[in-house]
Amino acid sequence: MSTKKTGDLGEDIAAKILTKKGYEILERNYRYKRSEIDLICLFSDLLVFIEVKALNSTRFGHPEDRVNNHKIEKVIEAAEDYIYAINWQKDIRFDILSIDLKHPDNFLHIEDAFY
């Protein structure tokens, strides 16, 4: 499976998981310059920026281990643009949703993963 297909499948699964947990999906693949946020959600009065990582195998590590400092900086950069664009005045949070595609029901949702 290509990287793009893996990512799209992971995001589809993540959106279903989050919707079941009561999150409202506001945006998918929000782009700002060379930055991207996989999912932007509303949960209660909280704006949540979610980085989705999905892998077909955990042989070489878990999906969440692939979120490095460079990726975090890019997500924060795009989040700042989004916050400004909609004039958000309430709290925000950055989460990671890690999915093993061979066992998608065994996901890991890391709340407040970075800031």
Image (cartoon, rainbow, N blue to C red):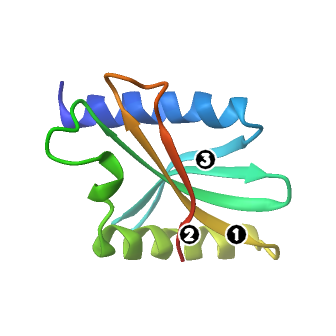
Task: Where is residue 38? Give x, y as percent.
Answer: 47, 49
Secondary-structure class at tag 3: strand
Amino acid type, residue under disc 3 in the picture:
Glu
Q: Which residue is rendered at x = 29% and y = 68% of the image?
A: 68
The residue pinned by badge 3 equals 27
Q: Which residue is rendered at x = 46% and y = 30% of the image?
A: 106
N-terminal-most mark, 3 or 1: 3
N-terminal-most mark, 3 or 2: 3
Which numbered mark, 3 or 1, is in the foreground of this view?
Answer: 1
Placement of 4 over or under 36, stated as above or below? above
Amino acid type, residue under disc 2 in the picture:
Ala
Q: How many marks?
A: 3
Secondary-structure class at tag 2: helix
The residue pinned by badge 1 equals 92
The alpha-carbon separation of the residues under discs 1 and 2 comes to 9 Å
Q: Which residue is rendered at x = 64% and y = 67% of the image?
A: 93
Placement of 66 over or under 70, stated as above or below? above
Of residues 48 and 108, which is closer to you in this image?
A: 108
Which numbered mark, 1 or 2, is in the foreground of this view?
Answer: 1
Q: Quadrant of residue 70?
A: bottom left
The residue pinned by badge 2 equals 79
Q: Which residue is rendered at x = 47% and y = 36% of the image?
A: 107
Q: How many neighbours does mark 1 have within 10 angstroms: few (below 14), some (14-19), or many (20 or more)?
A: some
Toward the right, the furthest residue is: 45
